[in-house]
Amino acid sequence: MEDLFKKITAHCKEYGFIYPSSEIYDGLSAVYDYGPNGINLKNNLREYWWKSMVQMRRNIVGIDAAIFMHPRTWKASGHVDAFNDPLVDNRDSRKRYRADQLVEDFISKLEAKVEKEVEKARARFGESFDEILYRQTNPRVLETQQKIDATAQRLTKSLAQNDMAALGQLLTDCEIADPESGSRNWTEVRQFNLMFHTQLGNIAGEEGKLYLRPETAQGIFVNFLNVAKTSRQKIPFGIAQIGKAFRNEIVARQFIFRMREFEQMEMQFFVRPGEEMEWYDYWKSKRMSWHQALGTDPRKLRFHDHENLAHYANAAVDIQFDFPFGFRELEGIHSRTDFDLKNHQELSGKRLQYFDPESNENYVPYVVETSIGCDRMFLAMLSQGYCEEAVPDAEGEASSRVVLKLHPRLAPVQCAVLPLLKNKPELVERAQRIFDDLKLAFHCQFDDKDAIGRRYRRQDAIGTPYCITVDFDTLAEGTATIRDRDSLEQVHIPEQGLCRWIEDKISWRPLLEKADA
Ligand code: GAP
């Protein structure tokens, strides 16, 4: 799977999906730029989210708030005091780590050890192997499992109690070493705030300290009353937003999975106090349907309840995706209570109450939030779509290809027009005419370079679902051949019907219907 991840990363660069930021200066860690194909795919993901969360819903409206916000926003939201990760430095290698991740990696190694023992036993005992009994009775497995449980318990407790000394002691007791240098010469563990900051031009000192937002949600909270009044929405209703967020991650690994500048697609749903758990369940189910509608293998998606709740939540669940490096958070669904609005009300001195005409009372609404990283969704789609397979070439000989099996609606290029032969001006001209018509409706490419087989491979590699070949039948009978990326089936369609045929295949309608099921 590590190999697959490397291949996906290389593929992204080679085919213009993603480049390291400022690469000519050797890049900037955990910051990336999207290339010509990447931006199309990303735009399609944004559009899918926006259509299903805003266009499809009478009780959700969108906004686009500024990245910079009044500094007190972040005091009220709790981010100044509590948006921290436990940082530890190694004195010998001068490398920085997240202390909790070092312990988690240690636990993962122990778990791998247990799995190896179990697999060895399975091979030894064959058919008669009773895995449950083995796990419950084998002394080596039991001893390792006890160590795993005790370590996990200490980790959870030290994080919950914000006890950095206990976390440092855990590193020592587990004899955890720097993965690069092997040194155990650690500094004490301390909290590190993840917010980037900068300075307002005309105010010196702390007062002019501005933060780059670590989540888009706060732009929604501070606008809650503005939106409620101007859009005449009644509770329950939601506000949606897509925008950049910034986090000074201590360890940023795994390509675009953990970035320092990334994009969130968030929706805050304002509800009556006491009804939040009902809506929490509702949004859990709706968001899972949104993922499944794309045809994602159901075994690659799962819910994962949070054990350590963020400072604002009374319930939280992740939708995890099985990335090439294992199941990880793709989206979060959080019941945020009235934490944010209440704190903004207190610190700003402005009433953020809603008058409910049904119950005739004023209250601070509760909030259920859905929050997905656009970049993580992008990585999930590439991980699930990337495929190496054997296929016959244009002459029917055995060959292989790399194909991105993206949902056709999300593909960066929806169709490619390919004149069969470059040196036949009548074919090229006719193909150009077809292209000029299709480009009015789709992201369409025109390609007349190289043999037709190589052109198909180029389109497969970027996930183009339909390739239209213009050949002598087009000249004689007015039909073109459409090749399906996944099945390789070819159909002949009258030239005038091409646009309609493709439109039917990539319409938003069935996708949005499924997502709303
Ligand atoms: N407003 C709630 C919030 O921000 P979160 O779980 O911290 O919650 C929500 O983030 C989503 O944002 C995550 O599920 C993930 O998809 C994305 N995300 C968070 N940190 C990220 C990072 N450093 N790089 C890329 N995506 C990130």
Image (spheres, rainbow, N blue to C red):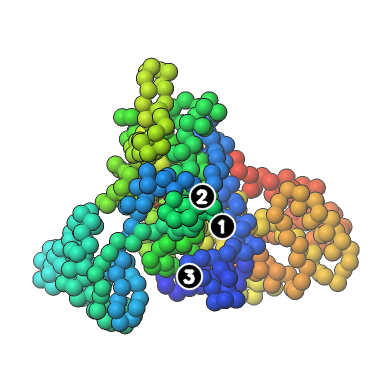
Give the residue pinned by disc 2.
68
Give the label on residue 406, or none: 1
Residue 304 lies, with reference to residue 150, above or below; the image says above
Residue visible at 37% across and 39% down in the picture: 347
- What amino acid is found at the position of numbered circle 1 in the picture? Leu
Q: Which quadrant does the N terminus fall into? A: bottom left
Looking at the image, can residue 68 be seen?
yes
Horizontal side, residue 446 vs residue 514: left or right: right
Is disc 3 placed on a helix, strand or loop? loop
Please provide percent x and percent y for residue 243.
Answer: 53, 50
C-alpha span from label 2 to label 3: 23 Å
- What amino acid is found at the position of numbered circle 3 in the picture? Ser
Please provide percent x and percent y for residue 402.
Answer: 57, 69
Q: Quadrant of residue 420?
A: bottom right
Horizontal side, residue 75 vs residue 478: left or right: left
Dot 2 and dot 1 residues touching (CB under 8 Å): no
Please provide percent x and percent y for residue 372.
Answer: 45, 50
Residue visible at 80% across and 51% down in the picture: 437
Label 2 within 8 A of ligand 1 by Cβ: no
Please provide percent x and percent y for residue 353.
Answer: 40, 28
Is disc 2 placed on a helix, strand or loop? loop
Residue 509 lies, with reference to residue 80, above or below; the image says above
Along the viewing direction, whichever of 355 and 485 lies nearer the viewer: 355
Residue 308 lies, with reference to residue 128, above or below; the image says above
- What amino acid is found at the position of numbered circle 2 in the picture? Phe
Total numbered circles: 3
Residue visible at 48% across and 43% down in the picture: 219
Q: Residues within 10 Å of mark 1 (few under 14, many from 20)?
A: many
Is disc 1 placed on a helix, strand or loop? loop
